[in-house]
Image (tube, rainbow, N blue to C red):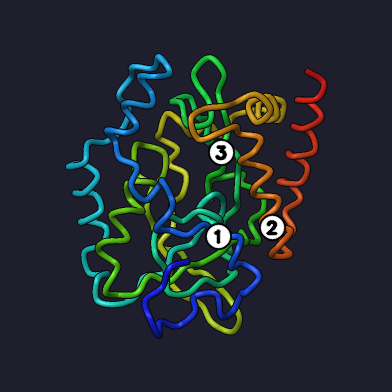
């Protein structure tokens, strides 16, 4: 990752992640805009404009960050944010957020990893009634330096709040001998894309068959499993879903 001269190494605590996390300055997610999204979806024959306008999204970001610009900002990632954050960070740590679970309940129908005819599936952080894994969710926390919070959260909001799916919130994340309040994005059960009623067979089908301009849902799941192996994170649901989805894909 590109750093300023004499800037502390963000991978000091986890050198094994140095080659596992994409350089934010080279990530297409850093510059991807709603105009790019509109163009990609038109190319796929999709015409529904489901995303927030830039003005709506920036207003939401301003309201959320009010009172949180005077210090460093920690961000908790539990899925693709772990290997491709798109924002510059000063430190990364493995962390655990109690009371939440990683659940595959984001049904993508808008072209990223699936369409309405062949939905894809992605993960969301959830604390809804009946959510298993209540002991906590393992992932990574990234520290954004205070002087970069404004610029880097604009990048983050363009990625995570491009349209209705997640709600920005602060959670308590634990690592080593300390805890921090970390920004993360949790499932918005009022959003069209969040479907907590999916059966296991539907999840497997969507993971095995969904594809879009970001790639396949199956590769998305494989990336999560691979990153967990590097970190020594055990997630039995991810492992089982990958095993069952790959078997289903092979059978087709």
Q: Is residue 179 above or below residue 103?
A: below
Q: Nearer the viewer, residue 180 or 11?
A: 11
Query: Is 251 situated left or right of 12 in this image?
Result: right
Q: Which residue is mark 1?
A: 21
Task: Choose the circle earlier in sequence order: 3 or 1.
Answer: 1
Q: Position of residue 244 (x, y in %)?
A: 79, 34
Q: Which residue is mark 2?
A: 228
Secondary structure beneath dot 2 equals helix
Q: How far, Cα to Cα, is label 2 from label 3?
A: 16 Å
Q: Residue at x 52, y 69 (%)?
A: 173
Q: Residue at x 61, y 34 (%)?
A: 217
Residue 122: mark in rendering: 3
Q: Nearer the viewer, residue 107 or 42?
A: 42
Q: Nearer the viewer, residue 83 or 104?
A: 83
| Mark 1 nearby-residue class (10 Å; few <14, some 14–19, many ≥20) | some
| Mark 2 nearby-residue class (10 Å; few <14, some 14–19, many ≥20) | some
Q: How far, Cα to Cα, is label 1 from label 2?
A: 13 Å
Query: Is 248 situated left or right of 63 in this image?
Result: right
Res 166 → quadrant: top left
Which dot, 2 or 3, sits closer to the camera? 2
Q: Residue furthest front?
A: 5
Q: Position of residue 15 (x, y in %)?
A: 62, 74
| Mark 3 nearby-residue class (10 Å; few <14, some 14–19, many ≥20) | many
Which dot, 1 or 2, sits closer to the camera? 1
Q: Residue at x 48, y 69 (%)?
A: 172
Res 54 → quadrant: top left
Tally of marks: 3
Q: Is residue 9 above or below residue 207?
A: below
In what quadrant of the picture does the C terminus appear?
top right
Residue 149: mark in rendering: none
Q: Could you tell me if the residues under marks 1 and 2 are in contact, i.e. CB atoms within 8 Å?
A: no
Secondary structure beneath dot 3 equals strand
């Amino acid at each position: 990752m590109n750093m300023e001269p004499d800037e502390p190494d963000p991978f000091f605590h986890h050198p094994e992640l140095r080659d596992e996390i994409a350089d934010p300055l080279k990530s297409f997610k850093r510059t991807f805009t709603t105009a790019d999204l509109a163009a990609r979806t038109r190319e796929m024959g999709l015409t529904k404009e489901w995303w927030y306008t830039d003005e709506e999204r920036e207003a939401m970001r301003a309201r959320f960050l009010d009172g949180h610009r005077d210090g460093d900002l920690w961000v908790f990632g539990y899925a693709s944010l772990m290997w491709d954050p798109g924002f510059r960070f000063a430190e990364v740590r493995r962390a655990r957020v109690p009371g939440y679970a990683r659940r595959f309940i984001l049904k993508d129908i808008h072209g990223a990893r699936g369409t309405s005819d062949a939905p894809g599936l992605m993960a969301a952080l959830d604390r809804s009634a009946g959510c298993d894994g209540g002991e906590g969710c393992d992932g990574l926390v990234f520290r954004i330096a205070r002087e970069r919070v404004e610029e880097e959260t604009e990048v983050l909001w363009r990625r995570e709040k491009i349209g209705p799916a997640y709600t920005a919130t602060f959670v308590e994340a634990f690592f080593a001998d300390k805890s921090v309040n970390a920004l993360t994005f949790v499932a918005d059960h009022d959003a069209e894309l969040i479907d907590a009623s999916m059966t296991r067979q539907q999840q497997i089908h969507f993971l095995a068959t969904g594809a879009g301009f970001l790639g396949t849902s199956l590769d998305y799941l494989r990336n999560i499993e691979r990153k967990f192996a590097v970190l020594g994170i055990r997630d039995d649901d991810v492992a089982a879903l990958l095993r069952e989805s790959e078997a289903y894909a092979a059978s087709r």
